[in-house]
Amino acid sequence: MPGRLEGKTAIVTGGGSGFGAGIAKKFRQEGANVLICDLSTENGTKVASSLGAEFITANVTKRSDWEAALKKCIDTWGGLDIVINNAGACYPNKPTEQVTDDEFDLCYNVNVKSVYLSSSVLLPYFLENNRPGCFVQIASTAGIRPRPGLTWYNSSKAACSNATKTMAVEYAPKKIRFNAVCPVVGSTGMTHLFLGKPNTEENMKAFTAVVPMGRGTTPADVANACCYLASDEAEFITGVNLEVDGGRCV
Ligand SMILES: NC(=O)c1ccc[n+]([C@@H]2O[C@H](COP(=O)([O-])OP(=O)(O)OC[C@H]3O[C@@H](n4cnc5c(N)ncnc54)[C@H](O)[C@@H]3O)[C@@H](O)[C@H]2O)c1
Ligand SMILES: *[C@@H]1O[C@H](CO)[C@@H](O)[C@H](O)[C@H]1NC(C)=O
Ligand SMILES: *[C@@H]1O[C@H](CO)[C@@H](O)[C@H](O)[C@H]1NC(C)=O
Ligand SMILES: *[C@@H]1O[C@H](CO)[C@@H](O)[C@H](O)[C@H]1NC(C)=O
Ligand SMILES: *[C@@H]1O[C@H](CO)[C@@H](O)[C@H](O)[C@H]1NC(C)=O
């Protein structure tokens, strides 16, 4: 049986760890060509070689790195179909008046400017080639259900979700789709920042206790949602903010 993403080519940012590594794995299993883009050369190379994916060291806040990613996809596979904006950054959970300029900039650069750059560099490619592109942003329940703490991380994710909806409407006539996936807390390289303390089972409990299904989001949960949204099964789905959160946002 052909995979659900057979013959498609995808960029997965932040694919060297956590949710991104899970997305890259699922996409390879479903037949997609995958280019992992990550700041960490060590992690990215390791994940890519274990999956038969390609890798480039890239900083998603740099236009030239997005241009390099597009060129790599065209040179290697002859084109690009799917963009998963998964790379994200956060500062340690703390009172909002203590956040520094650098921490604010980090959130908005990695979580918002990256999405801007991906659209700025890749939309002309999809439009000029009359290709039905597909963008999936990994936003967060943090952008939907405000509670105290992490103000600028959460607002950056709300901006990401909102930009996704805007672009969905704007590019719908061109059949370029934009959707977002919103996980609740999961155990990854970033978890200790959300918790504001080490990622131990005990510390996670306070966060997962408020999830109706009683656990955090796994890389497989995120990957399965991304696979559906990126596949042709979702050809009429655009502008959706899909919560993958065990009922947290209800
Ligand atoms: N873990 C959670 O609880 C949780 C919950 C909701 C949303 N998210 C979102 O999920 C996404 C994936 O994060 P994760 O939890 O898997 O964390 P992670 O730290 O395990 O993975 C993030 C990856 O992004 C890469 N990265 C960071 N900045 C980058 C940059 N400027 N350019 C390129 N790559 C960069 C890192 O090197 C890392 O490999 C993020 O957008 C995060 O905000 C995470
Ligand atoms: C590599 O990935 C691991 C596992 O997710 C993470 O803990 C580590 O911080 C990552 N290293 C770098 C340099 O990003
Ligand atoms: C990523 O690029 C931005 C913008 O050029 C830069 O400020 C930042 O330091 C870079 N991050 C890393 C880890 O190199
Ligand atoms: C921000 O998100 C974090 C992590 O998901 C959550 O714990 C916090 O309550 C949220 N805060 C706001 C103001 O949205
Ligand atoms: C984006 O902003 C508009 C205008 O304020 C609002 O109607 C919409 O609900 C927002 N969308 C998201 C996903 O926050």
Image (cartoon, grey):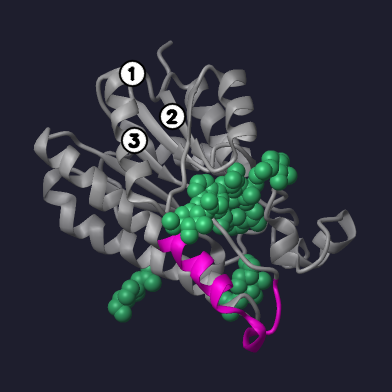
User: Residue 29: within the magenta?
Assistant: no
- Distance from disc 3 to disc 2, alpha carbons, whole Å, reads 11 Å
Q: Which residue is identified by label 2?
A: 35
Q: Which residues are magenta?
A: 93-112
| Figure check: 95 above or below 27 | below
Assign ligand 2 to one image quadrant.
top right
Quarter-of-image position of residue 168:
bottom left
Label 2 close to label 1 by CB (< 8 Å): yes
Quarter-of-image position of residue 191:
bottom right
- Most distant residue in the right direction: 202
Q: Is residue 236 left or right of residue 158?
A: left
- Distance from disc 2 to disc 1, alpha carbons, whole Å, reads 10 Å
Which of pointers 3 and 1 lies earlier in the amino acid sequence? 3
Amino acid type of the residue tagged 3 in the rendering: Ala
Q: Is residue 27 visible?
A: yes
Which of pointers 3 and 2 lies earlier in the amino acid sequence? 2
Which of pointers 2 and 1 lies earlier in the amino acid sequence? 2
Q: Residue at x 56, y 24 (%)?
A: 48
Amino acid type of the residue tagged 1 in the rendering: Thr
Q: Which residue is identified by label 1?
A: 76
Please state which of residues 11 and 232 is positioned toward the viewer in this rendering: 11
Q: Which residue is identified by label 3?
A: 68
Between marks 3 and 2 in the image, the one whose residue lies nearer the viewer: 3
Between marks 3 and 1 in the image, the one whose residue lies nearer the viewer: 3
Q: Residue at x 55, y 64 (%)?
A: 141
Q: Is residue 199 left or right of residue 117?
A: right
